[in-house]
Amino acid sequence: MPALASQSTVSTRSGVGKRLQGVAPWLALVLFVLMGGELVIAYVESLLGVHGLADMTPQALLAIGAARYAAGLCLALFGVYAILQAPPSSIGLRLPKVAGLALGVAGGVATSLIVTLLVRELRLQSSYNLQYEHYILSHATGLIAAALFLVFLVFGPIVEEIVFRGIVMGGLINVTNGVVAVVVSAVIFAGIHAAGGVAQITGAFTLGLVLGWLYLRTRSIVPSSVAHIIFNAVAFYPIILYMLRANRL
């Protein structure tokens, strides 16, 4: 009996070791992308002389947002080859079936409605920082305004899906089951958006659950990106409407 117990313990430890070895490259890639992105943002802010929200302008917001997402995309794609040594399809960069796209549209619309109701009924508030960013965004004009919406409504969601669904969930699926991977990735996604206040945390977590389910169902970031873009478009709708009425767009 002791010999059998010892063999069982060794087998268990071996299984845990293999799982940790499997997730280590993914964890390294996540840290590489997130930390590298923060360094790029800090560098751009120093170049622009932005030391806080008081120094922010629509042009600076555009430069910082574009730099953040461009760095995230480049670091993610480089890391897939250099760290994971895997093809882009390993992080969900593949075309889904038409049904997957339909799920993405439905998921984006449904989540937008659910989160809007939650925020309204529970009277959840956004942080001052997020409100001030929206104030700056609402005062952009012309090409700067169009570029800002392109960055935050389209480019940003696609990059975030590569990072949080393609990489974070991809790594979690290697060491746990799909349900846990979806929930944990949603928690991380909400944590990244914590600076936006309770309303944004709630919205990000709810959205993260839906986006995670879409990725788990299709193994493509395209449906989750579509849902994410729709969600952001609904969130920015009041600002877009205000800018249209003020002839800023």
Image: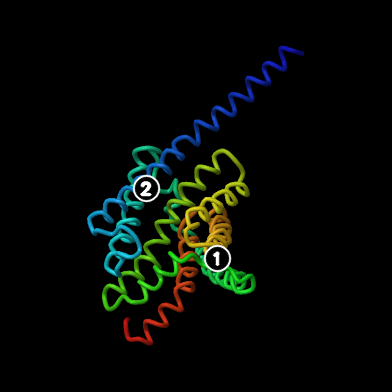
Where 24 falls versus 182 (above or below)?
A: above
Q: Name the spot of residue 28 as percent of width and height, x first.
A: 42, 38
Tell which residue pokes out farthest to the left in this image: 47
Q: Quadrant of residue 68?
A: bottom left
Is 12 left or right of 88, judged from the image as shown?
right
Q: Name the spot of residue 133 as percent of width and height, x first.
A: 39, 68
Which mark, by number, is residue 199? 1
Q: Tell me the mark number nearer the camera, choosing from 2 and 1.
A: 1
Instruction: Work out which quarter of the rendered image holds the N terminus and state it.
Output: top right
Instruction: Work out which quarter of the rendered image holds the C terminus and state it.
Output: bottom left
Which is nearer the N-term, disc 2 or disc 1?
A: 2
Q: Name the spot of residue 186 as percent of width and height, x first.
A: 55, 54
Question: Which residue is denoted by mark 2 in the rendering?
Answer: 76
Q: Amino acid at mark 1?
A: Ala
| Residue drawn at (40%, 79%) of the image | 240
Where 195 falls versus 25 (above or below)?
A: below
Colouring convention used in this rendered image of the protein:
rainbow
